[in-house]
Structures are given as C-alpha cells and as structure tokens.
Amino acid sequence: MAATLTGTIKVEVIPGSFGAGIYTGDFSYDDTHLTKIGSEFMTINGGNGDIPGLLSLNFRFLDFATGLTPVIYTARDHSILFPNGPGLSFENGIPTAFAFLVDPGNNGGPLGGGNGFAFGMGATGEGFLFAVQNGTIGGEGLVTLELDKPTSVDPTPVDPNPIEPPSVPENSSPFASLLAALGLGAAYLRSKLRTANN
C-alpha cells in the first residue's frame, strides 16, 4: 500500500569548527514505486532511470554571505540538476542518505572552493561539507535521517461550513402533546360546524 512518508534531517557540525551546532530540516516522499528490496535511489521526477517520488526537502542552514543568519534551502536550490536532483537513497525501503549539493556559484560549491554545502556518503556514514564567506570558512558534520511516526487520520472529510438542520421544538411533556392534539381537534370540529351551518 502506497503512502506519503515524512522525516527529519539532523546535521551536527563538528564541535570546534566554524558554525558548530545542530541544524535541522525535513523531507517527504511517496513510496509508491519503491520495491523496498536492496538499494534504490529516488528523485523528484524519476529522471535518469531513478524512481520518482521525492516530494519535498527543506534544510535550515547558515547563509553563504556572512555565515551567520540561518535560511531555509529547498530542493530547488540543488545545483544545476533540479529536478533530476536532489536524490534520496534507500536500503530495503529505509532512507539512508541524500545527494544534495547547493552550489550558488555553479563552481562545485565546497568541493570547488566556493560557497555551498553538500550531503554525501562517507566512510563513517552520511557526511556534510560546507563553505561560506566566499569559500574562505567552512566545516563538516554528520547527517542523520529519521522517519517520523505515521499518524492515523480519519478519512472522513470535514465540512468547514456545515449546514445546520432547522431546529424542531421539543414537547415539554406528554400532557402538553395531549392538549395540542385536543386543540387541533376542537378547531377542526368548529370549522366543520361552520361549513354545515352555511
């Protein structure tokens, strides 16, 4: 059964280096086309033979000019390959790594000595590399991906502007009902007598 899944991204920049701290983000994907067997790779549109289904990617990190103000980077910021990138790797249906390169100068980002950041696999897991202030300051960190726990949702749609049925007054007692019935009966008899007398 296909589902839209969401997860969180956590990057811990190594203590003692510029920008040390924890930076977070989120992602979502549709697992319709995943076989959940072995290694698989997903992009937004499934170009280049990859699986389609990556829906969103947001990551809050330092701006490149000063390296101070955090801003949100999205999948659209992925180098020149968007929408064939970024990509999300899976192992037996579990997200394991992002291939995400933000390279505003189109010169390789931190790999080419310019501003930017890159997610990628390393010997010890998924790594993170960045450079700011014209590529003069940078650092590295470790990336952790975690799936959010699914929440149950009531599939019944809720009308935001429901139409209330007209209110029906309730009888206050059986005695009141009897009096109302007798009153209607008396009015009916009077009208019959008037018709007969005319």
Image (spheres, grey):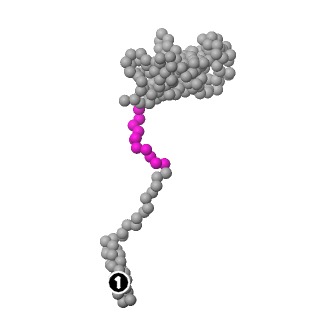
Extreme-bottom residue of the structure:
197
From the image, give the main secondary structure of the stretch colored magenta.
loop
Q: Is residue 151 above or below residue 51?
A: below
Quadrant containing the C terminus is bottom left
Q: Is residue 157 left or right of residue 137?
A: left
Whether residue 18 is visible: no
Closest to the observer: 44 or 129? 44
Q: How many marks?
A: 1
Closest to the observer: 107 or 26? 107
Q: Position of residue 150 (x, y in %)?
A: 41, 32
Residue under pointer 1: 192
Look at the image and give the residue range highlighted in magenta.
149-160
Asked if residue 137 is among those painted magenta in the image, a careful observer would answer no
Q: Is residue 10 left or right of residue 79?
A: left
Q: What is the quadrant of residue 5 in the picture?
A: top left
Q: Position of residue 196 (x, y in %)?
A: 35, 87
Q: Position of residue 122 (x, y in %)?
A: 50, 11
Whether residue 73 is visible: yes
Q: For the point 44% across and 46% down, which residue is it?
A: 158
Extreme-front residue of the structure:
198
Quadrant containing the N terminus is top left
Q: For the point 39% across and 37% down, which residue is it?
A: 152
Residue type (three-letter) at the residue carrying disc 1:
Lys
Closest to the observer: 76 or 125? 76
Q: How many other residues sit within 10 Å of disc 1, few (<14), some (14-19) or many (≥20)?
A: few
Q: For the point 52% across and 17% down, which residue is it?
A: 99
Helix, strand, or loop for circle 1? Answer: helix
Q: Is residue 72 above or below residue 109?
A: below
Asked if residue 154 is among those painted magenta in the image, a careful observer would answer yes
Q: For the point 35% across and 77% down, which residue is it?
A: 184
